[in-house]
Amino acid sequence: MRSSTANQITTPPDRNFFLAPQFPLQRQYEALRAFFVDEKASADVARRFGYSEGAFRVLCHQFRHHPEKRASFFRQPQRGPQSAPLRDRVRDLAVAMRKRNLSVYDMQRELAAAGHTISINSLILLLREEGFSRLPRRADDERPFTVKPEIAAVADVRRLDLSPGSFRTRLAGLFLFVPLLDRIGLQKVVTAARLPGSKMIPAAQAVASLLALKLIGAERKSHVMDLVMDQAIALFAGINVVPKRSYLAAYSSRIDHRACLRFMEAWLEQVERAGLAHGSSFDLDFHSVPANSTEEPLEKHYVSSRSRSQKGILVFLARDAAQGVLRYANAGVTKSEQASEILQFVRFWKKHTGELPAELVFDSQLTTYEKLSELNREGIFFITLRRRSRRMLQQIYSQPDAAWRRISLPALTRIYRNPKVLEERVALSGYAGELRQLTVMELAPRGADRAVDQSPQTRPGGTGDPLRATHAHRERNLRSRPVLPHRCLVLHGGNESGFRHATDTHGQFVIPHDGAAHRQRVQPFHSENGLSQSVGPVRQS
């Protein structure tokens, strides 16, 4: 079927591009073409393309007499360099090397030795331009001699050589721990924990290798590959060479949770027999280890470093405040077991030392009121933080000025040493008895406490309030969870470097890091007896 365009109502867009040009150069080209090729009248062409007759005559004069005007209509594309100076400089050398059956990596090394720097991709392009195909796979005897990785010896305790000798090492500090490990008896700990081992690498040598990595600050077991040639770490572990990365990773996977608990119990028992001192005050906290495992049904826990809840493993830690070392750890704690973990630690400590912990310090999310009542019945003192609520804040702000006392914090390297303290006795649901609650203000600059003297109705409700939590996103998540009262202490104030660290930076108290024996107690003035000795007396400023 034939179609005709003779009776079309509108002009197609493709034709309109040529009949009604939009760009100046295109319009000039079509106008000159209509005048010189189609032999249209000058006046008609000027009127069709929007020129005056004089302007079009000037355009025709420029086209006749100026070659640059003709060249402006069609520009030649700019071409890149037609030569490769870097490849051309080494072209003959590369061709000669390929005829010697050298690979591009061998060629790059020889060219670098001759003072020519060229990349692997450039060599591949050069050989392709010269018509060379890929080099077939070569046997080891066909390859040129190069420096190759040295194969380390296989870890085998039976090959340990203890004959007199000397060597250079950067890890000589490891041997400072040898007397301590000898007192503790690492072999007895490993035997009691029934850790796996073999004839080549017994359990004691495997644990000593992992311990050495921790003592030198290696973050991952894979970093042992940088130390396989160092004789110091092998001698510290009591083996000819330190085990490699694959063995250490597999060994860690072979130790289950029950073996870890046996090891911890045996270690603590040997530490007690060695006569190493331990404190009676402990810092308790949970730590979430993020995990992306799809095979295990992990629960979601709050990860403070990422400010969000995600799947992971919850670990309970107990740190000796006097010695600064971990005394207890338990991984894989579920949410249903979280509140009871503090009692589990108390039973563990009493079983292995024969006495209860004298003091426990933790934040408001560690356990519940009912568990605190059990601690109180056991006669265990504890210090914790209380989560702030709107009602509690209103009660604090409504207290008269006479209820607050000004105290002095001596021997602290800080500017604001005279905070205000409010002491109360409170009763909370779920806890049997009364709790001693302390509220501390004005630990920050005056500007931060500007709202202290205002009424609750005019006090701002944002995080700039010194008595409000700094982590507002956490406070929303905590409203549906159990909160803790205070057995001895509730503090509200700014984050001060001279105060003991807590999870919530708006509540901290005066306990330095050198242990409970050196804790900075708030001393009382002789005429004051409001604060009990459990936290310390107060000195009035």
Image: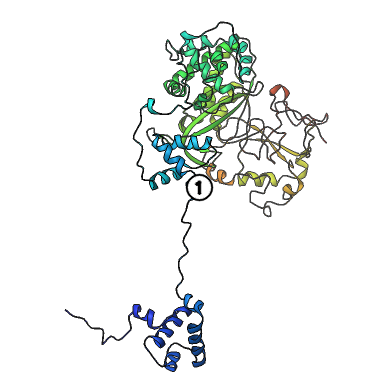
- Residue 505 picture quarter: top right
| x and y, in percent, of residue 84 in the image | 48, 51
| x and y, in percent, of residue 41 in the image | 41, 93
In this orientation, which residue lies closer to the viewer: 535 or 263?
A: 263
Residue type at tag 1: Leu
The image shows residue 169, relative to residue 97, as above or below, that is above
Using the rendered image of the protein, determine whether residue 397 is visible from the camera's viewpoint: yes
In this orientation, which residue lies closer to the viewer: 426 or 199?
A: 199
| x and y, in percent, of residue 369 in the image | 56, 32
| x and y, in percent, of residue 188 in the image | 52, 9
Quarter of the rendering occupied by the N terminus: bottom left
Locate residue 490 relative to residue 429 in the image: left or right: right
Instruction: Find disc 1 in the rendering and name its residue.
Output: 86
- Residue 367 picture quarter: top right
Look at 51% across and 76% down and name the residue there: 68
Look at 47% across and 46% down and name the residue there: 87
In the current view of this chain or complex, which residue is farthest to the top?
163
- Residue 497 picture quarter: top right
In this orientation, which residue lies closer to the viewer: 424 or 318?
A: 318
Q: Secondary structure at mark 1?
A: helix
Using the rendered image of the protein, determine whether residue 264 is visible from the camera's viewpoint: no
